[in-house]
Amino acid sequence: MPGLRATFDQAVTRHLSAVARLAATRAVLDTTSETGPAPEAVAAETVLGQRLRAAADTLRREPGWVRIGEGRLHEGGFPVMVPFPGHAHLRLSADAGDPRVAGLVRSVLLQTLATRPPGTRVLAVDTETVGAAFAPLRPLMDAGVLAAPATDQSGFTAALAAAEGHVKANLLGDGGGELLLVIASAPALPGALADRLAALARSGSGSGLRILAAGVPELPDSVDVTVGDVMRVGNPPNAPFGMRDGLAVPVVFDPPQPTDYLTAESQRLADRARAAAELGFADLIPPDLWREDPADGLATVIGRDAQGVVSLRFDDETPHWLIGGRTGGGKTVFLLDVLYGLAARYAPQDLALYLLDFKEGVSFTEFTPQPSDPTYIPHAKAVGVESDREYGVAILRELDAEMTRRSVVMKRHGVARYGQLRVHERLPRIVCFIDEFQVLFAGNDRLAREAVAVLENLARKGRSYGVHLVLASQTTSGIEALYTKRDSIFGQFGMRVALPGATSVLDGRNTAAQNLRTGEAVINVDGGVAGRDRRIRFPNAHADTMTLFRLRHDMWERRGEAPAPTVFYGYAEVTLEEQPEYGALVASDPPEVLLGRRVDASLRAASVRLDRTPGRHVAVLGSDRAGAQTLAAAARSLARQQPTARYVIAGLAEPGAVESALAGMAAPERLTDPDAVARVISELADHDGPAYLIGFGLDLVTLDRTGQADLRRLLRRGPGNGVHLLGWWRSLRRFMEDIGGTSGREDVACNLVLNIPGDELMNHFGQSAADWRPRPGRALLLDRQAGTQDLLVPFTAPDRT
Ligand SMILES: Nc1ncnc2c1ncn2[C@@H]1O[C@H](COP(=O)(O)OP(=O)(O)OP(=O)(O)O)[C@@H](O)[C@H]1O
């Protein structure tokens, strides 16, 4: 603005000429002291004082000038402004051990920050009062504007090194904004350090560094202030404004600013810096979708810090990330920023996402189709919401298998790295996000051991195959779980992200994550070591619903062939009717009885084939009433495939489930009397099929010796004759008695176990069943002939709410 510029230039000129003339006037006043000051000289000085006051008034609002005290005239005074940091550094001869100097240092610092760009950052040194000189400016420290003061020689050396790094970056044109080095007091400097400080001071105006140093013996290119009872302002470098012999009048210190003022002003400046450092969610999203090439890695913008915009990468240096922070610390928001940022930059052919959360963690549901919004993120392949460990491990196994597939392809092309493979085949990079990953290790059982092994393999080899992991946890013990499990896994996670409340993500001696606020994070690309931290602010994706909505829809519109992800909702019940395979059932022999949904990467139906081999019966075991519903669903799936078979329904318990089993059967025989059931068992023992006895509560049937023999004959010979039993026993002991104990074990090969603890199963099913921990909504399907053991969500009643 030319008008303002002109006013300022005038103010400077007026100030300079007034200062110069003041010296001359002073000389006259001083030589006439015997007879008292000459009235004309006093009058001239008064006029100059007025001019200086007016000029100071303008300069006060200018960046580059600060007030240091009041110039004393014979009558009145005027504010003394010095051209810091605009034209020069500033040296004070005494240090902050003198409270007046401490007050002046604070005042100059706050004035400077108030008129400089909000990105200005400050390195502080105070060895004499151990940082006390800066203590009232705490809000600036919390906001990352003012670094925690260095209080000893090594801290001072580190501050010099940081300032040197800043100067180098600026001189090379890498930017970095403006840095102030404020030394409130310093140790006696050995020659080498004094030389380094002097070199910094001489680095020139293009270096982006200004120095305010109190108590150092010298500082090139500075306004030099000698501190005694009053201050004497020396000759500024290049004397740009006529003070060739310094300021001719003594300068008195301003009264110290009260702590309340210092805190409030620091807070105001801190808030301003925070607001300026803020990026909006829209700033994370590139103008054009899917333009980036993943060959050398993935990158996305996440936020900014004092140095500018911060990007995060998945590449050879930081193939995997570890994220920590307490509940409510912003983990969900952070992950969403990353996910949307990546998905907007890379096409689904170039980036595949696997998203897992375990209990009470992030919810990735917004990436999946919902009844209210059928769109989805086309990069998402599998999403687990409140997943079981089994589901998580199954996904990890998939990724492990994918690495093996890629290694074969890479061998074929004679290449060793993902980047080289991309020349031949357009395979996507894969990123697997696991929230509350420590759940995978819970239990220290076979599954936990497998989780550790697969995770270790992925962590070690993933970078070569374009497979990346992001592990997040809200608890210290969660993060430590990884460390204590396998040191070698932890070491692979070069990228550390500490959100508010994170304790173990960074190195134990790194305190950078203290005092983080919501929306802030410390990013460390060096495994968490101190000194490699960037404290950033990241935007809240959910605060910009319009951009989010548009992005989702744009991506979905362009999804092409990318199918919706498979989604596993750990908390949800599943009915037979919603399982895709049920709709596809047609008349077939032998039939596949559907029992539930597998808890694995496929989420396909768990089924057993009832063919003519021995043992093809189904026992549902456990008192959980859900067992009756599952049996009913099995019966309905059977009726679709064997519409003309004979069905005998033993409805001894759970009449509601019995009713739903009958649906779809042409002419079922329904029995409700245990004795009638015993009789039909005897009849079916020597019967030719196809016939199915479906028993609800078979433990209610009392069998005499003959009856027991008939049942065992049915079990042993039935399948060969096309006769199968599907029964629900509420007691394992009773079931074992009925089938004849160990000798009858192989006669019922398919067992669906509900609420019977693993240690009770061992006798009958062997050691491998010992890990089973019953829980609502889950069942274990053991097929003795196939030797398999699968976790599934057993089907529930369609009308259950
Ligand atoms: N970058 C941000 N800017 C502004 N507000 C934020 C930001 N990140 C998070 N928040 C606020 O903090 C709240 C909690 O964040 P978030 O849900 O991400 O936390 P969390 O660590 O995932 O916690 P939880 O797992 O308990 O949900 C958000 O609802 C939002 O109001």
Image (cartoon, rainbow, N blue to C red):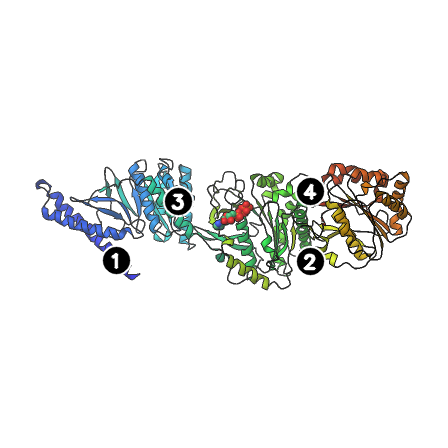
Whole-number angstrom distance, CA of label 2 to CA of label 1: 74 Å
Decide: is 440 above or below 277: above
107 or 251, nearer to the observer? 107
Whole-number angstrom distance, CA of label 4 to CA of label 2: 46 Å
Name the side, left or right, on which 180 lies relative to 592. Answer: left
Whole-number angstrom distance, CA of label 3 to CA of label 2: 58 Å
Q: Which residue is mark 2?
A: 412
- Which residue extends farthest front? 673
In the drawing, what numbered circle is on residue 775? 4
Whether the residues at callouts 2 and 1 have beta carbons within 8 Å, the answer is: no
Q: Earlier in the sequence, mark 3 or mark 4?
A: 3
Say what amino acid the circle numbered 4 marks.
Arg
Label 2 Cα neighbours within 10 Å, binned few <14 / some 14-19 / many ≥20: few
Name the side, left or right, on which 344 lies relative to 748. Answer: left
In the drawing, what numbered circle is on residue 7? 1
Say what amino acid the circle numbered 3 marks.
Leu
- Say what secondary structure mark 2 lies in: helix
**Spot occupied by residue 164 in the image (x, y as percentages of width and height):** 40, 47
Q: Which residue is mark 3?
A: 140
Q: Earlier in the sequence, mark 4 or mark 2?
A: 2
- Say what secondary structure mark 4 lies in: loop
Decide: is 410 above or below 39: below
Name the side, left or right, on which 730 lies relative to 136. Answer: right
Q: Is residue 285 visible?
A: no
Whole-number angstrom distance, CA of label 3 to CA of label 4: 51 Å
- Say what secondary structure mark 3 lies in: helix
Whole-number angstrom distance, CA of label 4 to CA of label 1: 78 Å
Label 2, ligand 1: CB separation under 8 Å = no
**Spot occupied by residue 733 in the image (x, y as percentages of width and height):** 80, 37
**Spot occupied by residue 483 in the image (x, y as percentages of width and height):** 59, 40
